[in-house]
Image (tube, rainbow, N blue to C red):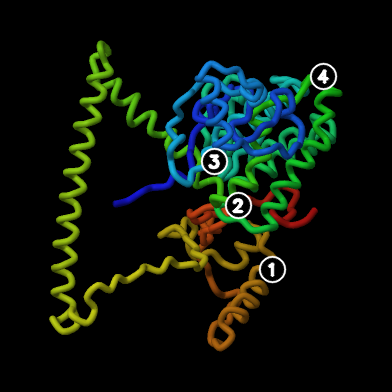
Amino acid sequence: RVYPILAAYVADFPEQCLVACCKENRCPKCLVAADEHGDPLNSLIRDPELTKEILERRRSGQHPVEFDEYGLRPVYKPFWANLPHTDIFLAFTPDLLHQLHKGVFKDHLVKWCLDIVGETEIDARFKAIPDYPGLRHFKKGISSVKQWTGTEHKEMQRVFMALITGAVPSRVVIVTRALLDFCYYARLHTHTSESLDGLENALAVFHAHKDVLQELAVREHFNIPKLHQLSHYVQSIKLFGAADGFNTELPERLHIDFAKEAYRASNKRDYEEQMALWLQRQEAVFCRTTYLEWVAERAARRTEQESEYDSDSDAENEGFDVVPVVSQDIIHVLAKTAPHPRRSVQHLETMHGAVDFLPALTLFLQKHLPHNHSIVPGPQDRFDTFRQVVVILPPDPRVSELPKCLRVRATPEVLPSSSGRKPGSPN
């Protein structure tokens, strides 16, 4: 028999409040007062046993004072009441999508800056950002966008600090940087004591300078429940690990798979039963397909083993799985065919301004091929010229499991000017 223990509960804020049996103007994790969400306080964590006792007393007809003080709602039989070794209030995990990206950043920080600068100026600054590989260009600004995704929030965060600099007072820049620092620290895939200190310091800097928003009449108060949730991030990360493992952004995609596509497959009348039947059939097809793929893969693996190993080696290596090693080397990618082949050294110096090309190439060869003295570049040599090289860096496990791609672009060829000055040369 298996007895699972509920350790972590992933949900958005309204669902957390419902499960915690508290009102939505209260914190589902601690006993902070309803009007103190904007203060950096260390309130007591809710006690499951005490909460069950108060709810039971309320159901029996009593009127305990703690029921209103703790902001409880009459949910008398929560599902977690009899689960062993479960503290539902500690089990609530950070929600990066709704609390940080959509909540604190998009719904509050961006709105505050729009109120200070104005939609026209912010849109003009977004439009003025030049195209750059790897950066999202909001060509129409942001004020007209109605529906945002988590990816778009992250893309906006990458340029938002530089975008508002010079348009808002310096203390607003400090507030913005503090919240963006918090967002980036919270998104890390791995944490150390230094990163958790950075998380706490970023929140402390925000609280120390947030008064400037009241001075500018942007906010009357900071009694924002999602802002208060940031104070619980460090504790949750210490208990359960990096917050990206509990982000609701991943299951958010299931709204499309399990709701929107199922609804489109119905005739739009009495659609609940049709949606359930469609999902059941999709699951059956998926299970059957997975089984067939497993059978085919197993047969292919068996055939490969029989062709590579004899019976003795098979017996020795039975049950041994080879773990693939992911390369951590830096990879350089060039086009298969050079767009400008066999260019002379004089052409590179004149048209591209690469006046130190030969000395730089000589030093490069001496550094990377120290024992090879047969390759000595000279002015008589010719070289293929490429427009760009793509550098693929190994992934940083603290940030992402995906490799990072950088593009190094060559200085384009420039025809001689009428002034006689060489292109690419200093004035």
Residue linked to disc 1 = 356
Specify the label residue 93 is tagged with. 3
Q: Nearer the viewer, mark 1 or mark 4?
A: 4
Q: Nearer the viewer, mark 4 or mark 3?
A: 3
Q: Number of marks in the image? A: 4
Specify the label residue 238 is tagged with. 2
What residue is rendered at 65% in x and 47% in y?
Answer: 234
**First in residue order: circle 1 vs circle 3:** 3
How far separated are the C-alphas under marks 1 and 3?
56 Å
Q: In front here: 44 or 104? A: 44
Looking at the picture, how far across and down is residue 204, in whole percent? 77, 42
Q: Amino acid at mark 4?
A: Ala
Q: Are marks 1 and 2 in contact (CB under 8 Å)?
A: no
Q: In front here: 133 or 151? A: 151
**First in residue order: circle 2 vs circle 4:** 4
Specify the label residue 217 is tagged with. 4
Q: Are marks 1 and 4 in contact (CB under 8 Å)?
A: no
Q: Amino acid at mark 1?
A: Asp
Element assignment for label 2: helix
